[in-house]
Every structure is written in C-alpha cells, then in structure tokens.
Image (spheres, rainbow, N blue to C red):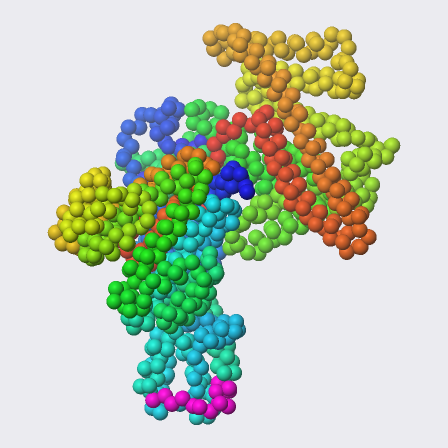
Amino acid sequence: MKSAIARYGYLNAKLRARLANLRDSNVIKNLIDAGTFLQALEALENTAYASLAAAYRETGDLQMMEKTLLDDEISMRREIHDALDGHSRNVAGFFLLKIEIDNLKNIIRIWYDTTVLGGNSGYRLNYIIREKILSDISWDAVINASSWEQILTALGNAPCREVLARFKKEDLEKDGLAYMEMALDCWYYQGLMAEVAKLGHKDRDVAYSVLERDLDIKNILILIRYGFYYNVELKRLQSMMLPGGQLYSDRKLALCFGVSDGLDRIQAFLVKRYPKLNLGHIFSYDDKMQLLSRSLELEYVLADEREVNYKRIMRGDPFSIGLIMAYFFKYDRFDNSIRLVLHGKYYHWSDDKILEVLK
Amino acid sequence: MKLITAVVLRAKSDKVSECLLKEGVMDFIDVKSLEELDSGLADVKAFEQSTSGDEVIRKADAIMKQIQGIYSQGMIPPYRATSQDIKLDDSFSLESASESVAKISDELLEAKQQLKTANLNYHSFEELDRYFKEGKAGYMDIRVGKFTRQVDNIQVKFPDVVLGVFPVDENVTGLVSLKRDAAKINPMMEKLGWIESDNLELQKKAQTGSQQFIDAETRQLLSEVTRKSDESIELVKSHRSELDYLYRELLVLKLCKKIKDCFQNTKNTAVFSGWVPADQAKQIEASIRKATDDQCIIEWTEASNVKGVPVPVELQSPKVLAPFTRIVKNYSIPEYGTINPVIFTTVAFMCMFGLMFADVGQGLVILLIGLLGSLMYKKNPLKKEGLLTDNLCHLLVYLGISSMIFGVLFGSYFGYELFPGLWFSFDAVVEGEAPANSLIKDIYGILGITIKFGFIVIVTGLVLNWINLFRRKHWVELVMDKYGILGGWIYIVGFWGCSYFVKSGYKSFPPGSLFLVLVLTPAFLMLFRGLMETLVDHKRFKLGLMDWLVNLLEVFSGYLSNTLSFMRVAGLGIAHASLMAAFKSMSAMTTNPLFIILIMALGNALVIAIEGLSAGIQALRLNYYEFFTKFFTGKGVAYKPVNIEE
C-alpha cells in the first residue's frame, strides 16, 4: 500500500496546478463577459475547456458540448481513482459512481418519458454515456430495454440493481420516478458513508466533516420539499432521508415521525435546531410555491458552506482525502458554471439572469 | 530611447493618433508625470478631464471577439494586422459593424443547427450500424411486408424514432428499427395497414438487406454531416473579406482610441508624451509634423536626462535567437543602459547543454524533433501549442546542434565511439578506459573542465556587471560590491590559489606571501565602502563593520558555491555516459542483432527523454542562478509601443 504522502502528494500537486490554471485563465469571467455565444466559444479557446469549442465546431450541438464536459469530468475522476489505492480508492470510486447513477437516472427518465408517458425525448439517448464508468454495466442493453423488467435484467449484477428491483413498473406509473431516484441516492450515500468509515482516523474525520454537513442540509431540503410541499406520508418521508449526518441520527427528530402532528413538530424542531439557516423565514410561506422557491435558498447555503469548508481543507493538511473531495467540489462548481453560462449565452439569457443562476 | 513630448491642435488629434499607430513605436507615458520633470508642462493647469474611450474600446473588443469566434468556427487563422491596414474608413461605424457581424453570426448558427440535425440523424443510424457490427442485432426489429394503404413518405409518419425503409422485392418492403421504439412504431404500422410477410426467403433477404441498407445509410448520413460541417466552414470563408475588413477597422479604431486616451487635452490642444527608440525619432517627428501640417510643438529629451520615470527597454536580438530572448525575458527585463544578455545566454546555454548531453546521434534526433515541430507550427498556425511549444521546438534545434558539436568533440554517436573524439573520448574516460595519450584521463579531469567552465561563466558575468555599473556610473558598487572589482579580484585570485592547490596534489597553496596579500588587500579595501559612499554619493558616513564582515563571508561562500555548482555539468555528463554504457552492456548480453538494435534504440530514447530534460533544466538553472545573478538586476521595464502588429 502506498504511503499517505505518495497517495495524496502527487494528486495534490497535480490538481492544485490544474485548478490554478483554471483560475488564472479567468475562463468563467471571460465567458460571462462574452456578449454572444460565439464570443463565449472564443473565450474557451486556449483554455482547459477548448475541447468544448471543438465539440461545437464539429457538431453544432450545445448538448454535445455538455457531453464532452462530462466525458472530461469522468476522465479526471477516473485518473484520481486510479492513482489511489485501498479505501481511499474506494471512496474516490464513489465519485465515479455518482456519475454512473446520474447516467442511469437519465436513461430511466428517457425510458419513462417515451414508454410510460408517450413523450418524444428518445433523441436524448444520443447524449448518454455509453462507455464504462465504474461498474460493468452494458449501457447498450439498458438503453435498449423496452420495459422496466428488461432494464432490471440489463443491469445484470450492477450493485444498484437491487435498489431498482424494489420498484415495480406500476409503482413508477403511479408515483413517478422521484421515490426511485431518492432510493438510489440513499443507497449511494449509505455506501459512501460505509466506505468513509473504513478510512484511517485522519481521513475519516475530514471526510465526515464534509459529508455530514452536506447530508444535513440535503435532508432538510427533503423534509421541506416532500414533507411540506408534496405532503408525503410521514413513514415514507422518514425512509427518504439520506442516511448520514447529525439530523438523520437525531433521536428527537425520529420521535416526530411517530406522531400524528409530526410535520408541525418537524418544523418546530428544524427551526430550533438550525437557527442560522433562517428556516423560520422559509416556513412562513403564503403558498406552497413560495415554500419551494424559498427552500432553494438552502441550496445556496449548502454551496456556500461547502465552499468555506473546502477552502479550509485546502489550506490545511495536503495529505488527506479531504483535499481530493475539495477538488471534486471545485471542479464540479467550475464545470457547472461553465455549463450554465454556455447555456445562458446560447439561449440569450441576460447577464443578470446568468449571474443569478450562478449564485 | 528618447522621450518625445508634443503639443498638437486638438482638431488634428485624430490624424495624429492614426499616424502614431502607423509608426507603431510610441510607448506612451502619462503626461502628468512629466510635471515632475520641470519641463514647463507643470504650468499647464488647463487639462480637461480626459474623455475616456473605454466604452468604444469595450464595444470594439466585444465585436472583435465575436469575429474571432466566427473565424475559429470557420477554421480560419486569426487576422494578422499590418501597418498597411491603418486607414480608417469614414463610413465605418461600430453600429454597422455590430449589425454585420450579428448577421453573419445568425447565418453561422443556422448552419450549425443544420449540422446538429445531420449529426443527430447520423448518430441514430450509426447506433444501428454499430449493433449490426457488434453482433447486437437482437436490439433491432427487422420486418418484411407491405403497407396496404398508400404511404408517400413513411419516415414522416414516424417522427421520433429511427426507422430504415428499404426495398426487399418489387412489392415487398423491409423495415428496420429498434425494439425499444416498438411501442411507438406498432400502432402507426397498424394504422397504415402493414401486413407482415411470412415468406422465409424474403425474411432472410431482408436480414442481409437491412444490414446493407443501414451501412449505406450511415455512410450517406456521415457524408451529410461532413457536407454540413464543410458548409458552415465555407460560410465563414465566404464572409472572410468582410470579416477581415470589419476586424481591421475595429482594431484600428480601438488602438486609435487607446492612443487618444493617452492624450491630455486643453481647450484647443492635445498634449502627449512617450518613449521612442532613438533611431526612430526623426521619422516619428516627420510623421507628426505631416499629420498636423507642421502646427505642433515637439520636444525631445535624452533618456539620460529623464529622472524618476523608468526608461523602457526594447530587448533587441536577432530573430534567430528568439528562444534565448524568451529565456531572458522569462527571468526579467534588463535595466535600460545595461548590456543585452541574450548573446551571452545563447553561448552559455549551448555550452552547458552540450557538455551535459554530448552525442551526435541523440543531438541529431533532438535537432530533427525541433525542425519537424517548427515546420508543423509553421504549416499549421492554428495548431494549439501543447507541451512541445513552437518556442521549445526552436530551442531544440539549437540544443540538438550543441549536442552534436560536443558529440564530435567527445566522440559519441548514439553511445558508440564511431570516430575518435576531437578533444577526448568522454565515454572512455567515464568507463576508466581513457587511452594514455588522452588529454583527459579520469573523471577528475572532467570535473576540472566544468569548474573552469564555471569560472569563465562567472567571470564573464562579473565583467558584464562592471561594464553595466560603469555605464550607469555606479562607482561605489563598481569597486566595492561583492560582484564589483574587489569582489571579482578576490574570486580570481582565490580561483588561482585553489587551482594551484589542486595541481600540487592538494598539498600547498601558492608559496610566499603574494597569495595572501592578493586576497587580503581587496578584502581590506572593501572596508572603505562607507567612506567611498560618503565621498562619491555624499551619503552620511558609517563604517559598516558588520556589513563588511557579512559581505566578505558572502564573497567567499557565495563564489565557492557558485563555482562548485558547475560540477553538476560534469555530473550530468557522466550520468549520460554511464547510462549509455549500461545500455551497451545490456546489448552485449545478446548476439541477436534485432535485440541489440532494440535495446540501444530504447536506451537512446530513454536517455534523450530523461537526460535531455535534465540537461535543459540544469542549463536553465545555471544561467538564472549562477550567471544572471552576477550582472542582471532585472529592474528594467519592457518597451511596449502601441503597435497594430503586436
């Protein structure tokens, strides 16, 4: 097994250099400053994102640019995964698995739209990743499945098959895909937290500090959206919570799920437990749409918290898994911003709207 | 360099800015900073708030970037402006330029939309084609039969699915689709009265026919993609002259605005100032006079008379030495009035590299890589620079030549001594097999060469420093500094003493008191730095005993470490020869000529990659830290004229 220094030193230097390169290139600022989509493409030239401009040149397709971005992201994550060993490698594997699950969700969404709803989003299969991401999934087989049972069969021995197998086609027809997708997320975080638990003391502490806060805010979002907006029954709501974080293991919250006025109690509990999140403001809604839009603010809080946390990690011990997680997050933000700005420029959004979305 | 300060009529400022841009030699400075120069401009209190051309520049920039984006989509290299382009078209306006570019952009985006559609169509059929080729025909439905109802264009009836329609027989149609689309296809087939044929012969025929059809269709769609892609490129090319015109006008407009932003205006006049190379002074004065019909006041100031404003430096070197100019610029810009170090860097760098990496064959490989790389960039200016940049390719040409020259001197040809070395056989010395008549017999001899080489480099640096200090009349530093005459004196005498010590078999220094006197005298004289500063620079007197001691320590330890640092040249040269010897030994273990060639080829490739890189880095390090530090203050300011070609 490689030493921690050998494990992380190389990646640290490499990723730090890449990030510095991205920052120095001012690519996002230049993209935002670009007046038109073609100017934005020019701003991508001679940067680490030049492949996107080339993708547009070859296909004329914005979504192909996004696929190219995703391909590059997979390469980067795979490179980091391959450079590690032991439990750190397994944890890094979960960051690849995230893309795999998203890919699977996308295929299922297209299948659901075309087969169950009779929609015409079949063309979107052109933008699906068909190469191996982490597991040995035959994406061709999954894509060509024409029924839910065939999708399950096509997944073969893929670890996530078990989760999907809990759902019947009738369930999906009745409830939509949200519960299935939530179950996939739960399974993902369960696996990730279990793998993090196997890390060495130092790595584990850093990883937990990042993931637990993340999961707390995601769980708050689930409680607000599904509990208060969609009125999901309490038992089901409890099962939808992502496994991990302090909120999930809070006994006081668990007690709220067992009583008839549970939702009110959950609301009171959240407001009291997280005074800094200004949940009182979110819950004082006139209509449910307002609740939903206000809950979006929590996404920003989550992003800001992550940013602060990762900055702290990046200034700290360079030989911990936290650093790699920080880079994944930074790259994700970078890639998302680029995706959003390109989208905005292509569809002639105003600069204000782009900045609002980027916030 | 000379400083020009000119006052022109405000009404003529457009013409003047145009003429200054055409000359392209003016490095503007803020006129207000001249108030400190007692040039008379201090009395001018009537400067108006300058009207910034920022908005125009920003707009012009935005349109230019859009044009660059269009060029890039059309695979057209960026427009290279020349001074011939400088003539503003009176009918040109930012608004009309913006409209024209927007129109071309829309056309291009429309063409790209068509390309996208073609591409999606191609990918749909390519998926089917791939399934056939990968033996995944199970994902497909192949049907044979006929429609009982009249259908003119079948595909139109199935808008959201991939459907291939091909004739199987005169009256029989074949259909190929994906099974996953069955839910959408089947109801429509029923509507159109499809009757499936149960003729086995026809079904077999359809199997082969479908594959051929999909293959042909995929090819055709691919060619459609290529055609659409070419069309979008052609579209840009067809607008090339218009785009070039717009870009040129925007560039000129932007630069003229930039120049005018450097003007300070009074009610009727405009004042500007800037640096001009001395040999261009007459030309620029004539141009300004012509542009203003001689209604102007021009004043020239010699650089030596300008105080408080840094004089910019134009690092002029022959174009062929561009890689070495880049090395110098990467370090810093030399101060105005000091010696241009490029030529010295060239010689030092090539000698250092050659001493560390001496081999005719390997040098030839590096030379060829450099030549091919340079040629590639020349032929394809749009090519993105990777790790092997254009500049690096040029540098490789020099390094290859250097390696070959030293290879001939040391008799090394891909690690073999095909011809005896003109100087001595480096490999034989390293392997301990130097002939009796060899000039160098052991590796101590090699170390000695590099130490002497280091001495030459350091002394060259010192001499350059003395010349620079003499030119700038920094007398105290010239005499008293550790890199001044006294410091150099200690170093040269010290080197002589050490050489004597080595030659005596590490037993004695030069006899008598001469050596001691020669070392101690300059060391003692350095104590009077404070006095000299008082006498020459009129500074307050201080003895500076501690400074003197520290300076002396730095002289002794610094020069020693600087000189010994050159032993790395020998070290890398020996490592290079040892690695080649190792590969030769490995190849001697086999008699199979193929293996011998393979081992030596791999060995040479490895040595070129690893040793070549190490030698390059070490040569750079020696130049920067051992050579440049002796004379190169790096306090210079780069000369940046407003020039359309830059």
- Residue B491 percent location from the top left of the image: 66, 18
Please state which of residues B191 and A39 is positioned toward the viewer in this rendering. B191
Q: Nearer the viewer, residue B114 or B157?
A: B157
Residue at x 49% of width, y 28% of height: B635
Tell whether position B576 is magenta.
no
Left or right: A102, with B453 as reference point = left
Residue B195 is situated, as x and y percent measured from the top left of the image, at 38, 90
Residue at 39% from the left image edge and 60% from the top image edge = A162
**Residue A63, can we see it?**
no
Residue B122 x/y as whole percent: 44, 71
**Label tally:** 0
Placement of A194 over or under B213, stated as above or below? above
Residue occupying the point 66% across, 24% down: B563
* Outermost residue to the left: A286
Q: Is residue B195 magenta?
A: yes
Quarter containing the N terminus of chain A: top right
| Magenta extent | B193-206
Q: Residue furthest right?
A: B436
User: Which quadrant of the figure has residue B232?
Assistant: bottom left
Residue A57: percent from left, percent from top? 44, 61
Looking at the image, residue A4 sits to the left or right of residue B259; the answer is: right
Q: Is residue B586 visible?
A: yes
Q: Residue at x 51, y 41 (%)?
A: A7
